[in-house]
Image (cartoon, helix red, strand yellow):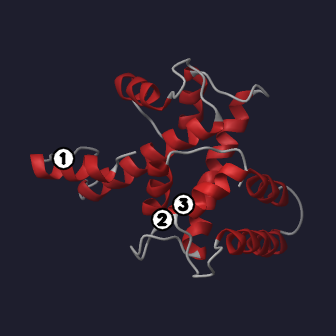
Amino acid sequence: MVLSLKLLSNLTESGNTREVEMESRAILREWFDRVDSDKTGGITAIQLKSAFAVGNLHFPTSVVQQMIRMYDFDKNGTMSFEEFAELNKFLLKVQQAFSDMERGRGFLVPDEVYKALVKLEFYLDSPAFYTVCESFDQMRCGKFRLDDFISLCIFVQSSRNLFNSFDTSKQGRVTLDLNQFIYCTANCRI
């Protein structure tokens, strides 16, 4: 997947936009078809997790399942090519925000994580930010590798999506009863 992300990122830096989009889509389709090893037209969480591991990105199965849930528009539990293309757009943005901050070290510290989240238009207050950081700092060392940062962003985006579904008046506040709260926490589980 890292190779795929880098190839698509490089393609977008040069050339005719329409041609680049078509070439990017063709490369993405080729990658998708390789991952869809059983040729069903859909990628499962296990297939996607294996593909990420080839690119040296190691995610718990629960994070990969959440990636699929975020973009599984037809709710069939797998990821079609179109759904995968949407996930890829999100991952490219996350990877770019990470790359902009990591300065060749291969990790971000919490202050850089915060700045990268702001670049992605995630605005968290201090208590929420530090709680999320504690949850996704796998090694408990204050250093977030790309896979840690992606996992954190998947959680925050999933939470935002769910929050927005309850914030129908777009006021930035919701009131939940216990059942709704349990529904939310179960849907954002990672």
Q: CA distance from mark 2 to mark 3?
A: 16 Å
Question: How far is the residue under mark 3 from the one under mark 1?
Answer: 29 Å
Q: Quadrant of residue 24?
A: bottom right
Q: Earlier in the sequence, mark 1 or mark 2?
A: 2
In this rendering, the label closer to the viewer, 3 or 1: 3
- The percent position of residue 33, horizontal first and vertical second, equals 70, 75
- Residue 115: x and y in percent read 58, 29
Dot 2: element: helix
Q: Is residue 173 left or right of residue 144?
A: left
Residue 166 in the image: x percent, y percent? 24, 55
Instruction: Using the rendered image of the protein, determine whether residue 28 is visible from the camera's viewpoint.
Output: yes
Q: Residue at x 65, y 45 (%)?
A: 57
The residue to which callout 3 is attached is: 46
Which class describes the residues within 10 Å of circle 1: few (<14), some (14-19), or many (20+)? few
Residue 121 makes an appearance in the image = no
For label 2, the crowd category at 10 Å Cα-Cα, with few meaning under 14, some 14 to 19 and many 20 or more, is many
153 relative to 73, above or below: above
Foreground residue among 46 and 147: 46
**Closer to the N terminus: mark 3 or mark 1?**
3
Q: Which mark is residue 49?
A: none
Instruction: Give the amino acid at mark 2.
Output: Tyr
Label 3 SS:
helix
Q: Which residue is mark 1?
A: 181
- Image side of residue 99 versus residue 74, left or right: right
The residue drawn where x is 42% and y is 23% is: 130
